[in-house]
Amino acid sequence: MSTITSITSGASEERLEKLIAERLRPGADKALIDERIWDLFGETWSIMFTDLSGFSRGVEKFGIIHFLQTIYEAHRLLIPIVDAHDGILLKVEGDSYMIIFRNVHKALSASLAMQRLLFAYNADREDEEKVLLCVGLGYGRVLKIGDTDVFGAEVNAASKLGEDIAGAWEILVTESFREEAGVTPGLGYEPIDEIPPGATGAHRVLYEF
C-alpha cells in the first residue's frame, strides 16, 4: 500500500510540474493550461488547520522536552478523533495539523469532539500541562496533489483562521464552510471582524462543552 501511495503522489507531482513548466513558456495558453490543471487535480474538500494556543510561550518557559510531551499528548488524543470522522491528516508541522474531510459535517463534528475531549482532559491538570486547541475550517474547491498537499483560497483562509486568528477553545470557519454546513442543532455562528484573505467572511462557532 505504501508503494502504491508513493507512486501515485509522485506521478501527480510530476504531472503538475510539467504543466507548470509548460505554462512558463513564452506564448503559452495559460487559461487552457489552468483548465487542464483544475481538471486533473481540482476536488472539493473541507480543510482543517489546528494549532496549540500559547505553544511558543510554553516552549520558551518550560523547554523543548515539555514541547515534545505536549505534541505527543495532542497526537495521542486527537488523531483517533480524526480517524473516527474519516479525516485525512496530510501535514504535521510542529504543533499544527492540516487535515482534510470529504464531508463538511464530519469536519465540524471532529472539531467539536476535539475541543470537548480536551476540555475534559484539562479539567484536573495544571496550566502548563493543558492542551489548548485552536481550529480553523474552510470548504471549497482545491488543488489536491496526491496525498501530500492541497492548495487554494479556502486552504489559505483556514490556515489563517486556525493558526493566527483563533484563540484557545475557538473553532473559526469561513463563510463557505458555514454555508455548506447549514443549520446544525445546538450550534450557532457569530461573525468575526478579521476576515482572512481568500474568504468572503468568517465566523466563530458557538457551542457548549
Image (spheres, helix red, strand yellow):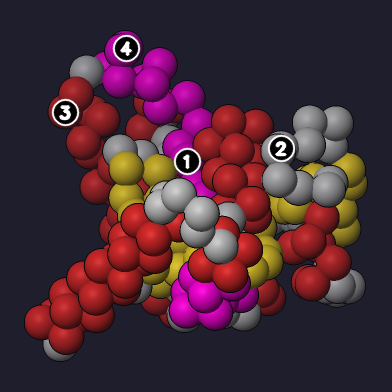
Can you tell which quarter of the image residue 160 is in? top right
Q: Is residue 87 left or right of residue 191?
A: left
Q: Amino acid at mark 2?
A: Pro
Q: Is residue 153 left or right of residue 24?
A: right
Identify the residue under disc 1.
Answer: 51
Q: Is residue 9 above or below residue 171?
A: below
Q: Pick the residue in front: 62 or 180.
A: 180
In terms of sequence position, does the residue under pointer 3 or pointer 1 come before the other? 1
Q: Is residue 38 above or below residue 65?
A: below
Q: Position of residue 182 (x, y in %)?
A: 86, 72
Please tell me which residue is depicted at 24% across the width and 75% down the height of the picture: 11
Considering the image in quadrants, where does the N terminus appear?
bottom left
Number of residues whose C-alpha sits closer than 10 Å to that of mark 1, classed few (under 14), some (14–19) or many (20 or more) = many
For residue 15: magenta?
A: no
For the residues labelled 3 and 4, the Cα–Cα distance comes to 11 Å
Q: Amino acid at mark 1?
A: Asp
Number of residues whose C-alpha sits closer than 10 Å to that of mark 3, classed few (under 14), some (14–19) or many (20 or more) = few
The residue lying furthest to the top in this view is 61
Q: Which mark is residue 61?
A: 4
Q: Position of residue 95 (x, y in %)?
A: 36, 40
Q: Which mark is residue 196?
A: 2
The reply to whether the C-beta atoms of the residues labelled 1 and 2 are less than 8 Å apart is: no
Q: Which mark is residue 153?
A: none
Q: Amino acid at mark 3?
A: Ile
Q: Secondary structure at mark 1?
A: strand
Q: Position of residue 80 (x, y in %)?
A: 37, 70
Label 1 or label 2, whichever lies nearer to me, is 2
Please tell me which residue is depicted at 31% across the width and 64% down the height of the picture: 18
Q: Secondary structure at mark 2?
A: loop
Q: Pick the residue in front: 35 or 140.
A: 35
Identify the residue under disc 3.
Answer: 65
